[in-house]
Amino acid sequence: MSEFSPQLPTSAIAPDRTLNAKTETWFEYPVKIYPHHTDHAGIVWHGTYLKWLEEARIEYFRSIGVNYADLVNLGCEMPVVELSLRYHRAIRLDHHEVLIKTVLKMDGVRLNWDYQIVSLDGQELYVTAQVTLVGIDAKKGKIMRQLPPDITDAITRKT
């Protein structure tokens, strides 16, 4: 019987311990709850959370001076390679608004995002999530060895 040893598909996504940037504070992104976010019972539909997490990521990048169009122009795609959500409490249409909080941990070409979806006063925790993105060279279709310097600089300046 052979022992299974998981192998990463490429060393490019292996953790780079020399560059381990992490934001120190949570980035906050408020969202309003509309009927199209909910199911027939008025509870936020599970797919809505994924959209909100992406919106918060895009707004985080914008807040540090990186527009998504900049990533595209640099030939950098950032697909989600790992996703985990934990539902703690249902969000209902009558909650009106919630806060998406995110913090970024950069590890080489991996961008690891932690999330909390909470009430505006921070007293209710609805969802926690983790999302990992990896930089892909759009022309080659392969994992980048490193993120474009403009992106890395913007992220590390923020931390």
Image (cartoon, rainbow, N blue to C red):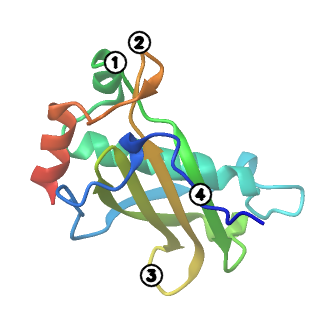
Q: Amino acid at mark 1?
A: Gly
Q: Earlier in the sequence, mark 1 or mark 2?
A: 1
Neighbor class of circle 2 (other Cα within 10 Å; few <14, some 14-19, many 20+) is few
Q: Earlier in the sequence, mark 2 or mark 4?
A: 4
Identify the residue position indicated by label 4 in the image.
6
User: What's the CA distance linking mark 2 and mark 4?
Assistant: 28 Å
Image coords of residue 43 (percent x, y): 78, 64
Q: Amino acid at mark 3?
A: Gly
Residues at circles 2 and 4 in contact by the CB criterion of under 8 Å: no
| Quarter occupied by the N terminus | bottom right
Q: Is residue 68 above or below residue 138?
A: below
Q: Is residue 90 left or right of residue 116?
A: right
- One can see residue 31 in this view: yes
Q: How many marks?
A: 4
Identify the residue position indicated by label 2 in the image.
139
Residues at circles 1 and 4 in contact by the CB criterion of under 8 Å: no
Identify the residue position indicated by label 3 in the image.
122
User: What's the CA distance linking mark 2 and mark 3?
Assistant: 43 Å
Residues at circles 2 and 3 in contact by the CB criterion of under 8 Å: no
User: What's the CA distance linking mark 3 and mark 1?
Assistant: 38 Å
**At 21% across and 37% down in the image, what residue appears?**
151
Residue 59: name its quadrant.
top left
| Quarter occupied by the C terminus | bottom left
Image coords of residue 5 (percent x, y): 60, 61
User: What's the CA distance linking mark 1 and mark 4?
Assistant: 30 Å
User: What's the CA distance linking mark 1 and mark 2?
Assistant: 7 Å
Identify the residue position indicated by label 1 in the image.
75
In front of the other: label 2 or label 3?
2
